[in-house]
Amino acid sequence: MAKGTETEKKFKWKLKPSLWNKLTFGFIGVSMFFLIGFVENKHANRTVLKTAVKIDFEDDNYFVDETDILRTLTMNNADQIVGKKYRDIDLKSLELRLESIKFVEDAQISADHKGTLMVEIRQSKPIARIVTQNSPHAYIGSNATALATSDKFTSRVLIIDGPFTSKLMKENYLLTDSVGSKYFELIQFIDQNAYWKKMIAQMTLLSNGDIVLLPQIGDYEIKFGKPEDIELKFKKIDMFYHEILPTKGWDAYQSVNVAFKNQIVCE
């Protein structure tokens, strides 16, 4: 019995990881650590040979081009990137530099193993244009920020005019103000609905904040009232288009009022 027990103990001891295995795993771990460090050091010592710019031209917006990006990236050639070592470049600072361009919403920069600095640009998307008499025109971006207009490109979006538009130009008004956010909700609703985006050409904001919509087709106006019950009001406009105008004709009325609850007033 004693011999059997001793043999069994020896058998069990052989199944345990040996000191050699532990040393082997330790050596592999240290080797991997030094290998990663070597690769990272080699990457950091690479030289930028060229830059590759990719711009997202979603919705056919062409507010910036490759020339604008490269000019800003190099600070008008005062800070040449090509020829620099990767280790001497702060990618985050370069991204912030590009995002200072008024029409750049996001910039992502990375460096590959061939010496190419890859720049990816996402443009701000304008969803409406504010037209005023006493101040410069501006766009409203999809993130509710005001964007200055561009000399090189004009985006075909909803036009907003009227005396109340000056409030929309205030910083963060559409984003943080409880009333302003309602106007932005209406602008978003029109922009994100393919049908209404085609049908509504202009939004006039009266001095009291009431809204008048002007359609693409027809010589009449839609009195919308305040930016409240948006979906319900558009259902009434839809009823006007599909049930009233077909029987009365497109020139039968000068205005349709959907501001009142449970009724459509045509004049």
Image (spheres, rainbow, N blue to C red):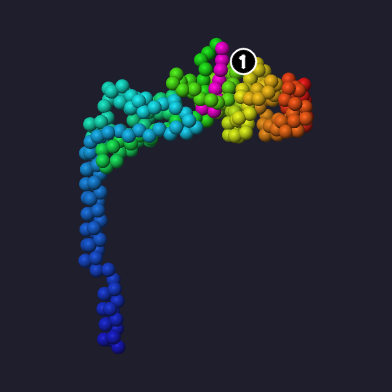
- Prevailing SS of the magenta stretch: strand
- Image spot of residue 163 (x, y percent): 62, 15
Q: Taking 13 as reference, is 128 above or below it? A: above
Q: Secondary structure at mark 1?
A: loop
For residue 189, which quarter of the picture? Answer: top right
Q: Disc 1 marks which residue?
A: 163
Residue 217 visible in the current orientation = yes
- Image spot of residue 159 (x, y percent): 58, 22
Which residue sits at x=33%, y=36%?
A: 118
For residue 128, which quarter of the picture? Answer: top right
Left or right of residue 109, residue 27 in this image: left
- Image spot of residue 256 (x, y percent): 73, 24
127 falls in the magenta region? yes
Q: What range is drawn magenta here?
A: 126-133
Residue 179 visible in the current orientation = no
Residue placed most toward the observer, 240 or 78: 240
Which residue sits at x=22%, y=50%?
A: 34
Which residue sits at x=23%, y=38%?
A: 46
Kind of residue sitting beneath label 1: Pro
Callout 1 crowding tier (Cα within 10 Å): few <14, some 14–19, many ≥20: some
Residue placed most toward the observer, 242 or 31: 242
Left or right of residue 257, residue 70 in this image: left
Residue placed most toward the observer, 242 or 261: 242
